[in-house]
C-alpha cells in the first residue's frame, strides 16, 4: 500500500514542523512579512494551518477554518504575494 502524502510529510509531527517553517519563512520574507506582523493570534493561525495541511494531505484532521476566499477577503493579496507565500510553503516541504 502506498503511503499518503500526510504520512510522507511525517504525519502530525511533520506537518507541525512544516507549518512552523513556513510561518518563519513568511515572517522573514520581505515581500509578505508585514502581513504576518499584523496577526494577533499566531497560535490560532498555526493550528488552522496544521488542520488545513493535514486534511489536504490525507491525514485524519478536518479543517475547521474559513474557505480560502473568505479567509483572505478584503486583503487584496497580489499575485506576487501569493507566489511568495507558495514558494515559502514549498521550501518548507
Image (tube, grey):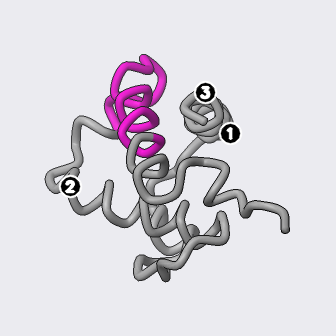
Q: In the displayed structure, would residue 78 be above or below residue 52?
A: above
Q: Quadrant of the C terminus?
A: top right
Position in image of residue 90 (x %, y %): 65, 34
Determine whether the residue tagged by mark 3 lies in a helix, strand or loop: helix
Residue located beneath label 3 in the image: 91
Name the one closer to the observer, 80 or 41. Answer: 41
Graded by Cα atoms within 10 Å as few (under 14), some (14 to 19) or many (20 or more), the crowding at tag 2 reads: few
Determine whether the residue tagged by mark 2 lies in a helix, strand or loop: helix
Rounded to the nearest whole Å, what is the CA distance between mark 3 and mark 1? 18 Å
Residue located beneath label 2 in the image: 43
Query: Do labels 1 and 2 touch, CB within 8 Å?
Result: no
Query: Do labels 3 and 2 touch, CB within 8 Å?
Result: no
Q: Nearer the viewer, mark 3 or mark 1?
A: 3
- Pick whichever of labels 3 and 1 is earlier in the sequence: 1
Determine whether the residue tagged by mark 1 lies in a helix, strand or loop: helix
- Pick whichever of labels 3 and 2 is earlier in the sequence: 2
Identified at 15% across, 52% down, the residue is 40
Identified at 53% across, 65% down, the residue is 54
Rounded to the nearest whole Å, what is the CA distance between mark 1 and mark 2? 26 Å
Position in image of residue 85 (x %, y %): 56, 37
Graded by Cα atoms within 10 Å as few (under 14), some (14 to 19) or many (20 or more), the crowding at tag 1 reads: few
Classified by dominant secondary structure, the portion drawn in magenta counts as helix
Rounded to the nearest whole Å, what is the CA distance between mark 3 and mark 2? 21 Å
Q: Nearer the viewer, mark 1 or mark 2?
A: 2
Residue located beneath label 1 in the image: 79
Identified at 62% across, 57% down, the residue is 7
Q: Which residues, given as a range, are shown in magenta? A: 18-35
Amino acid at each position: 500500500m502506498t503511503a499518503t502524502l500526510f504520512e510522507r510529510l511525517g504525519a502530525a509531527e511533520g506537518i507541525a514542523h512544516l507549518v512552523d517553517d513556513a510561518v518563519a519563512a513568511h515572517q522573514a520574507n520581505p515581500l509578505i512579512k508585514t502581513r504576518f506582523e499584523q496577526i494577533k493570534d499566531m497560535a490560532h493561525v498555526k493550528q488552522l494551518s496544521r488542520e488545513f495541511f493535514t486534511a489536504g494531505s490525507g491525514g485524519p484532521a478536518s479543517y475547521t477554518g474559513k474557505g480560502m476566499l473568505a479567509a483572505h477577503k478584503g486583503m487584496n493579496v497580489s499575485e506576487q504575494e501569493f507566489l511568495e507565500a507558495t514558494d515559502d510553503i514549498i521550501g518548507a516541504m
